[in-house]
Image (cartoon, rainbow, N blue to C red):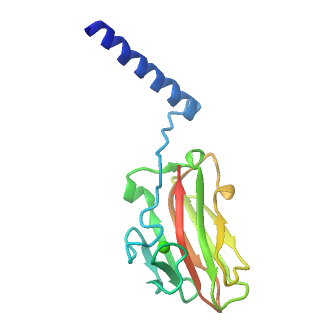
């Protein structure tokens, strides 16, 4: 019956508004869901989704997952993903469930990497992960972020003068 159907639609609509209110704390924020990085595991075998500086490579000799990983060879080698350009939106920090990268130092006993987060207001947070010896390290970015802001892009840069870095499985999930 039309009236009964209309009532059901109204209920769904009301529930949706209520959920939105809880998530946004009245600020109108809508959270995306799922993985927000493109090719964060480098399994496309190239830098799809990233722009690069210096001369990083996609390689197969030391993957953390699958077949491929990214390797930095020189200081300031970097990969950057502009999430806003790829997705058409920014990601509110309060929506993020997990934000991490796996890093592996190769020839540098105190290898270190900078992760540079740019927010929608163009301010940044830089997180330095250091003492990366030659095993895979799960590096958690989320605790360092400003929970009042939204993530626009992420850059991962080699800060190690003497050696190389492997990275894999960059993940930003909501
Ligand atoms: Ca991989």
Q: Nearer the viewer, residue 80 or 37?
A: 37
Q: Residue at x 60, y 71 (%)?
A: 102
Answer above or below: position of 141 versus 160.
above
Q: Residue at x 65, y 85 (%)?
A: 160
Q: Nearer the viewer, residue 43 or 158?
A: 43
Query: Residue 138: x, y in percent?
Result: 65, 68
Residue occupying the far front of the picture: 66
45 sits left or right of 160 in the view: left
161 sits left or right of 54 in the view: right
User: Which of the image's four quarters has the N terminus?
Assistant: top left
Query: Residue 84: x, y in percent?
Result: 42, 56
Residue occupying the far left of the picture: 2
Query: Residue 143: x, y in percent?
Result: 69, 56
Q: Nearer the viewer, residue 95 or 41?
A: 41
Answer above or below: position of 22 versus 172.
above
Q: Nearer the viewer, residue 29 or 15?
A: 15
* Quarter of the figure with residue 48: bottom left
Query: Residue 29: x, y in percent?
Result: 51, 38
Label tally: 0
């Amino acid at each position: 019956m039309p009236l009964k159907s209309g009532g059901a639609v109204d209920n769904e609509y009301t529930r949706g508004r209520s959920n939105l209110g809880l998530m946004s704390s009245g600020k109108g924020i809508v959270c995306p869901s799922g993985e927000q990085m493109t090719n964060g595991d480098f399994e496309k075998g190239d830098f799809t989704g990233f722009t690069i500086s210096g001369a990083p490579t996609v390689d197969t000799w030391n993957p953390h997952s699958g077949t491929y990983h990214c390797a930095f060879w020189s200081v300031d080698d970097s990969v950057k993903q502009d999430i806003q350009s790829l997705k058409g939106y920014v990601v509110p920090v309060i929506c993020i469930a997990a934000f991490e990268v796996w890093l592996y130092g190769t020839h540098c006993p105190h290898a270190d990497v900078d992760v540079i987060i740019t927010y929608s207001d163009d301010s940044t947070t830089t997180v330095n992960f250091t003492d990366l010896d030659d095993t895979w390290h799960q590096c958690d970015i989320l605790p360092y972020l400003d929970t009042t802001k939204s993530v626009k892009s992420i850059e991962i840069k080699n800060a190690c003068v003497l050696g190389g870095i492997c990275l894999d499985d960059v993940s930003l999930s909501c």
